[in-house]
Amino acid sequence: MKKMKKFIVLFTVSLAVFACSDSDDDTTDQSSDGFDRGAMLINFADNIILPSYQSYISTTQDLVSQTDSFVVTPSIEELTNLRSAFRTAYLSFQNVSIFEIGLAEELRFRDRTNTYPTNIQEVTSFIVDGNFNFELPSTNDAQGLPAIDYLLYGLGTDEETVAFFTTDANAEGYRNYLFALVNSINILAQNVLNDWTSGFRNTFVANDGSSASASVDNLTNDFILYYEKSLRAGKIGIPAGVFSNDPLPGNVEALYAQDFSKELAIEALNASIRFFNGRSFVNSQSGPSYATYLDFLNTIKNEEDLSTLINNQFATSIAALNTLDSDFTNQIATNNNAMLETYDELQRNVILLKVDLLQAINVNIDFVDADGD
């Protein structure tokens, strides 16, 4: 999904957040509502964020290995193996994309890994001249998983795809660029996890107060911005035409794989549900979370627990996603109303999260948008 500044509605996915603060206000203001925010942060870090990154890195390492095999001896068989590793990594990425905090924010982890649609002209230019720098923000739409999607699925038939890496005049450039793409996302993930395990985790959980610079405030804003912009708008609303005069099917995630966009959206929503409920990434156990926080505060809306309302709406949204075609471009072409209805279901939780949750736990919005939410 193409991104601009966070103040622009259509292509916003990045949130400037800083979870570190040494001020006394951030570590001592725990008595305002009595909930143990520190325990929630520990659960988030140790049972969700860290194992999610560890799992994702295992998939990117396999992707590097499969890419190496393919570029050394390009063949349809190796292409098939590489595509399988790519899909696994893309699915796994959905579980870490939420957490644009700490070094992930500084490195533009989400933007560099998943800006779509890919800029084919720029990709081709980089392949031909071999001169590119993925650290430049201007290259966000020519790198990451969407660019890999184009090289593995967007060049033609299986035979034609292999030919680009073997007999094409720029075959060496194609091989080099593919490996650079894969190596880049692996290194990005490794750097973020290393930061978490070398000190940021401890700083993150210690910053358990209630202030604009505290971890709960920052992470909560990041989660809601991700859900609203990357998931609701990016995966569904923008391609369905919610923010434009007409649908934009060329803006779906995994555009070239064709049968993968729904699976990615469901994985992303399930990751959001897991996070909201504090459910471990590796098992079904749940710990302190937004859901338990709301229950602790006895937060009621329309005579029902707010946590129950949110989880019920999550379930309704999953059901709506499951009715869609596996290829969102085909869904838009044949019945875009179903996409729009799914967007509406996702939107209902934007209100519950962005207004009701934040008011209940006394967190202020630190980002600005203009889409009427």
Image: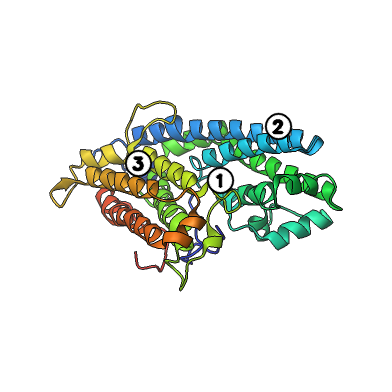
Which label was assigned to residue 276? 3
- The residue located at (53%, 46%) in the rendering is 260
- The residue located at (79%, 44%) in the rendering is 175
SS at badge 2? helix
SS at badge 3? helix
Give the mark, 3 or 1, whose residue is nearer the N terminus: 1
For discs 1 and 2, the disc positioned in front in the rendered view: 2
Q: Label 2 amino acid?
A: Ser
Q: CA distance from mark 1 to mark 2?
A: 24 Å
For discs 2 and 3, the disc positioned in front in the rendered view: 2
Q: Residue 361: horizontal and vertical position, in percent?
A: 28, 47
Q: Quadrant of the C terminus?
A: bottom left
Name the residue tied to disc 1: 104
Give whichever of 31, 352 is nearer the camera: 352
Give whichever of 10, 51 is nearer the camera: 10
SS at badge 1? helix
- The residue located at (45%, 41%) in the rendering is 267
Q: Residues within 10 Å of mark 3 (few under 14, many from 20)?
A: many
Name the side, left or right, on which 136 lies relative to 325.
right
Q: Label 1 amino acid?
A: Ala
Q: Label 3 amino acid?
A: Phe
Q: Residues within 10 Å of mark 1 (few under 14, many from 20)?
A: many
Which label was assigned to residue 65? 2
Q: Residue 245: horizontal and vertical position, in percent?
A: 46, 73
